[in-house]
Amino acid sequence: MTIMTTADAIIKWSIAQKVLIDDQVVPYFPATFAIFGHGNALSIGQALSNESKNMTTYRGQTEEGMALAAVAYAKAMRRQQVGIVTTSIGPGATNVITAAAVAMANRLPLLILVGDAFQSRNPDPVLQQVEHFDQPSITVNDAFRPVVRYWDRITSPSQILTSLPQALSTMLDPATCGPVCIALPQDIQAESFDFPDEFFEEKIVKIPRPRADSSELAMAATLIARAKKPIIVAGGGIHYSLAEKELSEFASAFSIPVVETMAGKSSLVWNDTALVGPLGVTGSDPVNQLVDESDLIIAIGTRLQDFTTGSWTLFGNKKIIAINTARFDAIKRHGV
């Protein structure tokens, strides 16, 4: 057991999370993107300073900009590594809501550590605190709830022993991947607790690889065999699953043309004979005509948003095979 503050424990735990990339063990949380204020400087900020040799901290000029940088980092790293964002309370926190929504919409992981009002309420109202006359337990951080996959307010240091692993699981699972918000009251950040040493032991986390049901695979194979003009719509999930090689081999083996969404660009190299180009609102007329003439859509790793489907005018009533780790996306428009 080791006595330390909640803030120190959070950063120490974050550093202990590792991931295997290209046969090398690297940090799952390699960096923190931060703007410091009275709501996080003396605890989270001090904890980051104490661990500066083990975790890089980038300080920007606006919270939204730093949070969007962290989102972009997760996308560039194909969701295998995640940035931490920390802010003060009040406007420092609300400035991150847009970035959280971007991560939520695009199924990208992000760990947000926001300062919160004192749990004891003794100093209320602190600088930039919004008070609710009839609900004193509400703060502006509750505004994150609609735009994150996991939300928690830590009211006791011991709660991070369960909350952080649950948050990590949310970000790792391809079906639930998205931003996480942990609200940290200022007094709780600085409160000491006797944490178990095993909580800080190095752990190599794994991204689950869900498999399709055998009966669904058989149904999809039958539809592909019967199709006269099938077409593959390659989305961002191709990158996150590291499946570019498999896509190329599958498309080549069955002579199926591949069109790409915005997120799916570069799923195939430019000179791959199966690659046709981008589709939808940001695509080209010849590609959209090819999609319109197809009789089966094989949608791989795509949310099928309106810029891809042309608000569904491109797909019409065509049969759709949806290969997606998220059931929510796989069943859109009655996809198989």
Image (cartoon, grey):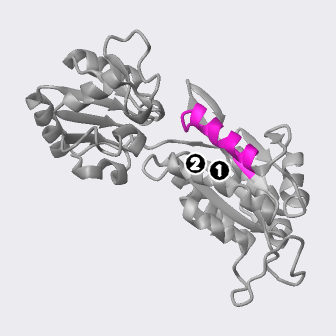
Q: Residue furthest left?
A: 226
Q: Out of 329 and 121, give the one closest to the viewer.
A: 329
Q: Which residues are magenta?
A: 64-85
Q: Residue at x 81, y 56 (%)?
A: 8
Residue 136 x, y percent position in the rendering: 73, 85
Three-letter residue code for mark 2? Ala
Q: Residue at x 38, y 24 (%)?
A: 284
Q: How many marks?
A: 2
Q: Quadrant of residue 255?
A: top left
Question: Badge 1 local density, few (<14 within 10 Å), some, or many (20+)?
Answer: many
Residue bearing the label numbered 1: 99
In magenta stretch: residue 79: yes
Residue 225 x, y percent position in the rendering: 10, 28
Q: Residue at x 90, y 53 (%)?
A: 46
Q: Is residue 18 above or below residue 169?
A: above
Residue bearing the label numbered 2: 103
Q: Is residue 103 above or below residue 262?
A: below
Q: Quadrant of residue 325?
A: top left
